[in-house]
Amino acid sequence: MNEEDREFTFASFWRTNLPTRNIFFTILIVYIILSILTIIFNPIYDLISLITISEDLLATIGQHNLRVYEGHVYQLFTSIFVHSNLIHFLSNSLFLFIYGLRAEEKFFSWQYYLIFIISGLLGSILSLFAFSLATISVGASGGIFGLLGADLVLAYQEEKKSSLWIYIGIGAIFLGFSAGINVNILAHAIGLLSGLIIPLIFKSRKLSPSIEKNVQLE
């Protein structure tokens, strides 16, 4: 492979995988900004402060149930892109790529975003009604579990039993990671359920890469 082919492959990867890339960079930028603000507003900080977002910031841009009831409804959405610490961010990013890149093979970008956002929002809404006013919820795991659900639907419809069990196994690992960083299970459950249902309403999906290439050449 010559240098031009390598450049083309690299460019094609980023061009093809827009939804996963865009969501990743969104949560990355949000985490970096909140980390910087945490350091600025905490003159005395230690290593924990460098990787953990302050609770005040999480209550402002994450989902603070009390503030949502007071009218800050936007938090149901913004909280999807907020992570409480470095481990939370890295684990969600890892599974975003695992499930997201597979979903991009079969779903159009608007379908992908719809699965992710609706699954995340339903997780936020369920958390609002299930937990106390003092609760602060953050994280993209609801949307990511939605992508997992969509991947399970694809594996089932394509009769790929091995893939189905692989995704279930990876999902169990993700659940273990999430439980360790105190992300609520209800958001995971509703996200997964949404991901299983939403793809069923799509009348069309992406063609395979080879077919798409032939259509473009004609």
Image: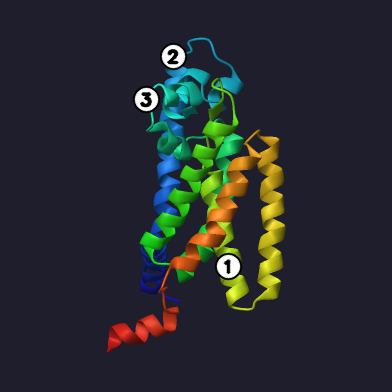
Calculate the distance from the C-alpha at mark 2 to the C-alpha at mark 1: 45 Å
Q: Residue at x 59, y 29 (%)?
A: 131
Which element carries disc 3, helix, strand or loop? loop
Which element carries disc 1, helix, strand or loop? helix
In the rendered structure, which amino acid carries the disc numbered 1? Val
Residue at image mark 1 = 153
Residue at image mark 3 = 71
Q: Residue at x 68, y 57 (%)?
A: 170
One can see residue 26 in this view = yes
In the rendered structure, which amino acid carries the disc numbered 3? Gly
User: In the depicted view, which residue is nearer to us: 11 or 55?
Assistant: 55
Which element carries disc 2, helix, strand or loop? loop
One can see residue 36 in this view = no
Precedes in sequence: disc 3 or disc 2: 2
Which disc, if any, is residue 41?
2
Calculate the distance from the C-alpha at mark 3 to the C-alpha at mark 2: 26 Å
Label 3 packing within 10 angstroms: few (<14), some (14-19), many (20+): few
Task: From the top left corner, tell me how far across and down residue 48 is, in percent.
Answer: 60, 22
